[in-house]
């Protein structure tokens, strides 16, 4: 039966992608098949083998230790302020992002991170036949985040075609930064976070190959990164990383406050007028998608509600909702929905990406704004593809 759900999911993703494709004649089956096969292999290794499970345990334990270390710094400033359940989330889940940001900054400063990114990007480009920039960007977005990644390629931004720009934006929305992975692991099961981070990179490129196919000649296939500037002093870099991490934590907190309040407000209005909450209503709308992805039929309305909440608000809001009802759901539902949630595919991300690009190149920012809806569609299809593939092994 799992294979049936997988086939249905593939049909959903590929038919919608084909309908909205910018050039159907240029869709290449070979790189798509290769990347999907690679996704299956990676998902199977991480979810169903001793080696993969061991890797996930090591990664989750490592992030757990980092979060514990980070909380010590938080407690030094805010010790004794924790209450139940008020400040716990902000203090123990969001503020540790600052410490993770420092570590990412250090790895980037000593050139370890750029070396790893370039190596993996090079290998990936040989596998899927896509451009060097596309693969470099896909890996980089998964490490440093959807906003910061644009700074690494700003010199090349002005020369990018609309199609290449779309591919980069899709990777940006489908990936999540290492900075907040630890925070995700505090809300949902770490193994699903790790698997989603890995295979979302490939899913985004698969969808880009369908929705946005194009040919690159050798002259276009260049990678120009912005790593020639003057290197800041070490402690200046640490200070900048601290502030970057703090901005992320506060931004996420502000988004949660606003969106959670808005959801409660809309739910109250819908309940008063229609005698059904807004989240339950959109749950019915998204229930067929959840069913096609392989969610057991008794959970499809609740799963659909969480999926829709993520698209309308953000992944943190949806993950919090999932955590609250996870004990009422099957393990398979929790796994599929968790993988779906680990990405930046939501309406607010369109504005974030548009703003980032516009700050570096106003003309290209206007281009991104015009395909915002198609960008959300592509990144959502990538999330569905990742969740459906993982569902086979749950």
Image: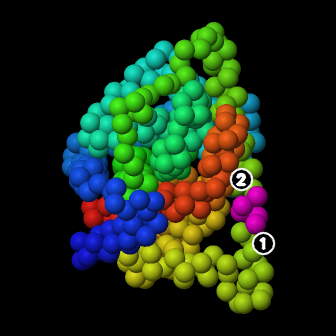
* Apparent side of residue 351 relative to residue 136 in the rendered image (left or right): right
Q: Residue at x 71, y 69 (%)?
A: 263
Assign the magenta stretch its main secondary structure.
helix
Where 197 falls versus 293 (above or below)? above
Q: Residues within 10 Å of mark 1 (few under 14, many from 20)?
A: few
Q: Which residue is mark 2?
A: 255
Query: On the image, which quarter does residue 320 sit in?
Result: bottom right
Residue 56 image point, x, y percent: 34, 43
Q: Which residue is mark 1?
A: 265
Query: On the image, which quarter does residue 112 sit in?
Result: top left
Where 392 falls versus 367 (above or below)? below
Query: On the image, which quarter does residue 114 sit in?
Result: top left
Say which of 211 and 5 sits in front.
Answer: 211
Quadrant location of the N terminus in the rendered image? bottom left
Count of all numbered marks drawn on residues in the image: 2
Q: Residue at x 40, y 30 (%)?
A: 219
Q: Residue at x 37, y 62 (%)?
A: 24
Of mark 1 and mark 2, the one earlier in the sequence is 2
Secondary structure of the residue carrying numbered label 2: helix
Where 65 falls versus 367 (above or below)? above
Q: Are marks 1 and 2 in contact (CB under 8 Å)?
A: no
Residue 354 image point, x, y percent: 66, 47
- Region in magenta: 258-262
Q: In this rendering, does residue 14 appear at all? A: yes
């Amino acid at each position: 039966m799992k294979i049936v759900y997988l086939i249905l999911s593939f049909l959903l993703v590929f038919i919608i992608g084909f309908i909205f494709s910018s050039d159907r004649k240029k869709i290449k089956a070979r790189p798509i098949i290769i990347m999907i096969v690679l996704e299956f292999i990676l998902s199977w290794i991480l979810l169903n083998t001793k080696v993969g499970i061991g890797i996930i345990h090591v990664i989750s334990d490592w992030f757990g230790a980092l979060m514990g270390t980070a909380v010590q710094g938080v407690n030094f400033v805010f010790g004794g302020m924790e209450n139940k359940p008020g400040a716990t989330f902000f203090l123990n889940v969001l503020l540790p992002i600052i410490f993770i940001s420092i570590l990412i900054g250090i790895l980037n400063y000593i050139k370890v991170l750029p070396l790893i990114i370039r190596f993996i990007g090079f290998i990936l480009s040989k596998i899927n036949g896509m451009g060097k920039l596309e693969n470099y960007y896909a890996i980089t977005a998964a490490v440093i985040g959807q906003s910061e990644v644009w700074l690494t390629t700003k010199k090349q931004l002005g020369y990018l075609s609309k199609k290449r720009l779309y591919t980069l934006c899709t990777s940006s929305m489908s990936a999540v930064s290492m900075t907040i992975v630890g925070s995700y692991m505090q809300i949902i099961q770490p193994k699903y976070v790790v698997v989603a981070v890995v295979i979302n990179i490939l899913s985004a490129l698969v969808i880009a190959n369908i929705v946005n196919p194009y040919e690159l000649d050798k002259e276009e296939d260049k990678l120009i990164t912005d790593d020639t500037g003057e290197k800041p002093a070490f402690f200046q870099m640490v200070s900048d990383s601290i502030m970057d991490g703090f901005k992320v934590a506060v931004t996420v907190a502000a988004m949660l406050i606003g969106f959670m309040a808005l959801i409660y407000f809309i739910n109250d209005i819908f309940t008063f007028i229609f005698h059904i909450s807004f989240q339950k209503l959109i749950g019915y709308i998204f229930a067929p998608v959840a069913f096609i992805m392989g969610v057991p039929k008794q959970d499809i309305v609740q799963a659909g509600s969480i999926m829709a909440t993520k698209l309308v608000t953000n992944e943190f809001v949806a993950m919090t909702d999932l955590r609250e009802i996870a004990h009422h759901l099957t393990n398979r539902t929790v796994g599929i929905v968790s993988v779906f949630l680990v990405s930046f595919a939501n309406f607010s991300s369109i504005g974030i990406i548009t703003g980032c690009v516009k700050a570096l190149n106003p003309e290209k920012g206007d281009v991104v704004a015009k395909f915002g809806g198609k960008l959300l569609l592509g990144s959502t299809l990538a999330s569905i593809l990742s969740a459906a593939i993982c569902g086979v092994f749950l």
